[in-house]
Image (spheres, helix red, strand yellow):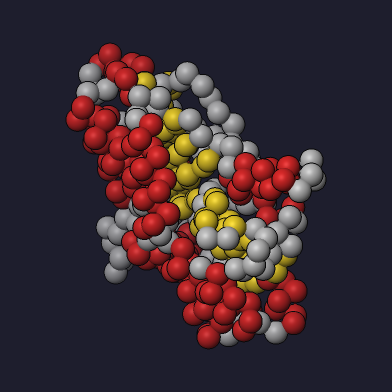
Amino acid sequence: MAEACRKWVDSLNPEQKAKATYHYLDGERQFWYYPPLNRHGLPLRDMTPEQRDLAYGIMESSLDAQAYEQAKAIIDHELILGPLEKERGIESFVRDPMLYYWTVFGEPGGEEPWGWRAEGHHVSLHFSVWGEEVTAVTPFFFGANPAEVPHGPEQGKRILGDREDLAIELMATMTDEQRAKAIIHENAPWDILTYNTTKAPVHQGEGLSATEMTGEQKEILLALITEYVNQVRTDVAHERLEAIKENGLDHFRLVWAGATDRSRDHYYRIHGGNFLIEFDNIQDGANHIHSVWRDVENDFANDVLRDHRLMFHVL
């Protein structure tokens, strides 16, 4: 990951580098958002073809192979969304796969903490590294609009279908009593509730506890959690999944809102300890997904960074 970042930074001219690089402790590192907007960092539009390849190389070094393909597909999805909106007479943001921005914080591979970010419409990736340890991989946001392509050459394409289908499969196994606890509202919220907060708010005690799930249901729950954790490179994902399995699932809770199928708006949240994922599909006739993985205490490596500051008496 450090090598990929160094190669990209070294390829930049001074003007590009001024846009693309920040000190690791700069407040910019903790800003994140997933709609299309003007961002800090260097967009693909302002890179040479060779520099774009190197930028994607950073992403490839950090993600699981499937998630890497999903990220590229989400970026290219702008070319599908633009014409669809034009057909419907919707005047919106420019849908351009060149408007995705890469940023590096600190010195890749140096002795101090460093990190990188790639962000644009429906993609927000944040990795922090210290020495040989990947200290944070969250917030990790993927979205898709349309969630299912309605027509055209890509008709039926569902980039994030697995995380939707697994959750619906889990709800289909529920008894009426379990559903009554899991479903907190008949309608889904308009967006993920953690939104783009720097620190994710936690709603304790809502939903169905995993202690009230059957063995089969816990297996599906773990598969759904794994769907999110496995987005990062295999060694990093394995470390985080092993910690979840070691602690067990009994402290996790499932929260649902809206329909329990794809007929209309639906939302779920899975929370246990510092682990939190959210999924929302309500906009554009429930054909527009937002999904995120958060670490309540350690998004942006805040928990690790606090230890670093204490070590050097900064706090």
Q: Position of residue 232 (x, y in %)?
A: 42, 56
Quarter of the image that includes the C terminus: top right
Question: Eyeballing the image, is 12 above or below 285?
Answer: below
Q: What residue is drawn where x is 32% and y is 41%?
A: 224
Q: Nearer the viewer, residue 170 or 221?
A: 221
Q: Quadrant of residue 41?
A: bottom right
Name the residue at the top extreme: 177
Q: How many marks?
A: 0
Q: Position of residue 90 (x, y in %)?
A: 53, 56
Q: In the displayed structure, would residue 3 be above or below residue 182?
A: below
Q: Is there any visible trace of residue 119 in the rendered image?
A: no
Residue 51 percent coordinates (x, y): 56, 82
Extreme right residue here?
Answer: 314
Query: Vertical placement of 23 versus 20: above or below?
Result: above
Q: Residue at x 36, y 17 (%)?
A: 181
Quarter residue 118 falls in: bottom right
Q: Is residue 62 left or right of residue 36?
A: left
Residue 175, by quadrant, is top left
Residue at horizontal 28%, vertical 13%? 177
Is residue 143 visible in this depiction of the protein? yes
User: Which one is in front, 136 or 196?
Assistant: 136
Q: List x then y, in percent, for residue 143.
A: 45, 52
Above or below — where is 194 with respect to 90?
above
Q: Is residue 298 left or right of residue 27?
A: left
Q: Nearer the viewer, residue 266 or 230?
A: 230
Nearer-the-camera pick, 236 or 87: 236
**Residue shown at 47%/44% (left/top)?**
293
